[in-house]
Image (cartoon, rainbow, N blue to C red):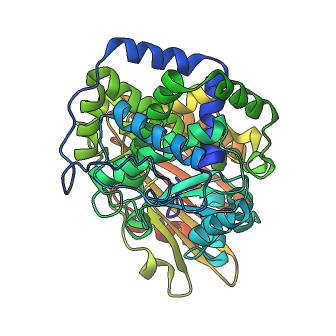
Amino acid sequence: MSRRVLLSILTLLLVACVVVSLISIGGVLTLVQHAQDSVQLLPTLAPAQGGLGSGLVSSDPAAAGFDGLDPSTGEQMNLIQARVAEIRGLQPVRSVPRSLLTRQELEQHVLDDFLSDYTPQEALENAITWNAFGLLPADFDLYNLYQAVLGEQVAGFYDSRTQQMYVVSDAGFDGLARMTYAHEYTHALQDQYYHLLDGLKVDDEHCAQETEYCAAVQALIEGDATLTELFWTYRYSTPQDQQELLDFYQDFESPAFDSAPVAIQSDFLFPYQQGLEFVQSLFDRGGWATVNQAFAAPPVSTEQILHPDSYPLDQPVQVELPDLQPVLGEDWVQLDRSVLGEWYSYLVLSSGWQPDARLSESEAKQAAAGWGGDAYQVFWQPHSGEVVLVQRWLWDTTADLDEFWQAMTRYGSLRWGPTTASQEGMLRWENTPNGQVILLRTGEEALWVQAPNAAVLSAVLESMQPVAP
């Protein structure tokens, strides 16, 4: 979507939900122990600018930007930084200023940072797009959801724009805060070596146009920080840290996140969950040197994140769509024009807002695998509220399209009921809540069109030749 939820600032909610829950069942600690025993830290790429600094981890809290912070906490943070740099094999190029905020100030900073360039109107348009794909109810208040989720228990974060660490000043530096700090300091090191904004271009403007690339790079960034954090937890967390993590996990509540539709929950977690699996796969191939190489030549699609063996050779194919504005007329507004990618193709099939219209995770994963490329457009008629959706996929092989077609046929029957017309390579539903719906296939391509009536549908299909049979 045009506004993928790529929120590295949401550290407590996302890191705690994913990492702490994984640690609690022992699976990731076993994974990290295996990785630690099987590979040595290897030489890294040279820093992006400057040389290795000296005395960057200071024993003087004031010298490290800790005016007003408890000296003991400052010393602990300095030690965590040194250990993260040792684990990750990236020695700091420069010191990282740390700004103290109360929990309330930090939460407001996060809200202001995200909402400063995201308006209720944009949220409404995003919700209309998500509804067309079946991922949100038609009247869902996406803006208030983001506001509520962002306000839930933020612990601190690294801001790549100011290159500062923001730290809660009125909370104890417990096991969860220490683990989170290890995660966030990894982002500071990534920024010093690979430049998150200027180098990797993970910024709002670029990501609005290159959603697949940014989703993939965000998964690399967060997967790296999560794996580093897990190494730190395994090697250096104390018994008290571990007990505090378990206590937090047992008592943790996130009502706003828990109330979010399942697709949004999954999308929040993608950079951390699937990103960790991707980076773990790279690490297993060749340690941190291989992870560093991925920062130098980043993944470009969610397909590569979901299938690490496809990285870096399997590149997405660009899929074209005609300009539908002349077809629909000037009273229609283009809300979105982008790429679903394999990840969102999977979410459409598995994570719709209507539980009865969901395929199983395994069926949806199998159907979305083999994605080669796609493109979509969503148009909206403000006066009538009518929506046009055009989604075009290209699959790697005919067999991949066959699997997808079977899954999409089943998905269509669950979402819209029995077809009103069907023939080889065509399925059609009339008078659905989404208006007229048609699915077409030819070669390795599949086309999904929704329109308010038969006349608009026919006009759109005429512009889409030669996909229609």
Q: Residue furthest bottom?
A: 330
Measured as percent of width and height from the top left, residue 268 is found at 59, 48
Q: Is residue 19 above or below residue 318?
A: above
Residue 397's quadrant in the figure? top left
Residue 303's quadrant in the figure? top left
Measured as percent of width and height from the top left, residue 164 is found at 46, 61
Q: Is residue 90 above or below residue 326?
A: above
Name the residue nearer the viewer: 435 or 392: 392
Q: How many marks?
A: 0
**Residue drawn at the location 66% of the way across and 72% of the way down:** 124
Q: Is residue 26 above or below residue 408?
A: above
**Residue drawn at the location 62% of the way across and 77% of the way down:** 119
**Residue drawn at the location 57% of the way across and 42% of the way down:** 180
Name the residue nearer the viewer: 453 or 363: 363
Q: Is residue 193 left or right of residue 337?
A: left
Measured as percent of width and height from the top left, residue 173 is found at 65, 43
Q: Is residue 133 left or right of residue 32?
A: right
Q: Is residue 436 visible?
A: no
